[in-house]
Amino acid sequence: MKPRIAIIGGSNFSELLESPKSVKVKTKYGNPSDFVDIGDFSGKTVAFLPRHGKRRNLPPHMINYRANIFALKKIGVESIIGVTSVGSLKKKISPPCVFIPNDYINLWNVQTYYKKKIGHVTPEIDEKMRKIVVGQAKKNGLTVHEGVYVQTTGPRLETKAEINFLKNYADVVGMNMAAEATLSKELGLRYVNLSSVDNYANGIILESLTFEQILQNARKNSEEIKKILKNVVRVIR
C-alpha cells in the first residue's frame, strides 16, 4: 500500500513507524537525504524521511530539498508534515514549547523546481491541515503558539544584529521549513509544519542556554510532538 502521508523530521522521530521498510528512491534531482522508511503509524501507511540523514551527517545548507520532496511525490505521498526545531524571536514564546506556523519568510536561497522554465506559485502552508494540527495539539492540553517562521540558510546561527532585525517580522527562526513548503506547493502536495521551540534566538534574552539545555528541551518536546503526530495522522484524509 502506498503512503499518502509523509513525515520529514530529525533523528528523534526515526522510530515512529511500526515494521518499517527502507526504500531507496532515485530522482532526477539527485539523492534525497536518506532512504525513505515506509511503515504503519496510527493505523495508516506512512513514509518517514530523516531530513539530516539517519547518521545526522547533513547540515541544513547541504540538504537536497528538491530531491527530498520529489522522492516523496514519486512514491505516492500527497500530504507532508514537516517537524523542525526553531529558535524563539519573542520572549512570550518561551522554550520548550510547540509552534505551528501560519506563514513564512524566505527571501534568500529560495528553492524551486522552475530552473529551466518560467513558473510561479503562491507559497503557503495548507490551512486545512494546519487547523488539524492546531486542534490536536490543543486536545493534548498544550499551549499552542502560532505565527510567522523565517528561514535562514545556516549552518551558522544568526548574529544578534540579524535577530534584532528578524524579530520585527517573524516569531521563530529556523533553517528548513520554508524550502520544504515552497517545493511541496510547486509539486501540488499539501504541507504543514510542527516546530519544536528549543531555545531563544541569539540576543532575545540576556541568559544564553547551553547546548545541553537545548537538547533537553528538544527531547521533552519530541515526546509531545509524537503524541500530536499520532492524532494528526489518524484524522487526516
Image: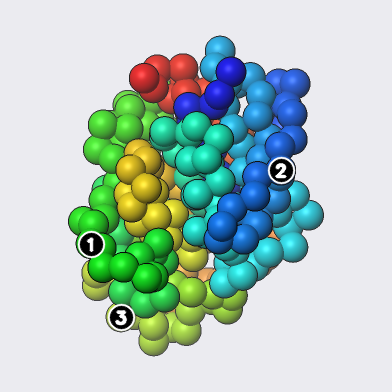
Mark 3 vs mark 2: in front: 2
Q: Earlier in the sequence, mark 3 or mark 2?
A: 2
Q: Tell me the quarter of the image containing the C terminus.
A: top left
Q: Mark 3 is on which residue type?
A: Phe
Residue at x 66% of width, y 40% of height: 36
What crowding class fits label 2: few (fewer than 14 Cα within 10 Å), some (14-19), or many (20 or more)? few
Q: Tell me the quarter of the image containing the N terminus.
A: top right
Find numbered disc 1 in the image and state the secondary structure of the residue it sits on.
loop
Disc 3 + disc 1, Cβ < 8 Å: no
Disc 1 + disc 2, Cβ < 8 Å: no
Mark pair 1, 2: CA separation: 30 Å
Q: Earlier in the sequence, mark 1 or mark 2?
A: 2
- Furthest residue in direction top, as rendered: 43
Residue at x 50% of width, y 32% of height: 76
In the rendered image, residue 18, in percent from the top left (x then y), is placed at: 71, 21
Q: Residue 173 lies in what quarter of the image?
A: bottom left
Q: Residue 210 lies in what quarter of the image?
A: bottom right
Residue at x 35% of width, y 65% of height: 114
Disc 3 + disc 2, Cβ < 8 Å: no
Mark pair 3, 2: CA separation: 42 Å
Q: Mark 2 is on which residue type?
A: Lys
Badge 3 is on which residue?
A: 165
Find numbered disc 3 in the image and state the secondary structure of the residue it sits on.
helix
Mark pair 3, 1: CA separation: 28 Å
Q: Residue 98 lies in what quarter of the image?
A: top left
Q: Mark 1 is on which residue type?
A: His
Badge 2 is on which residue?
A: 24
Asked whether residue 56 is in view, the answer is yes
Badge 1 is on which residue?
A: 120
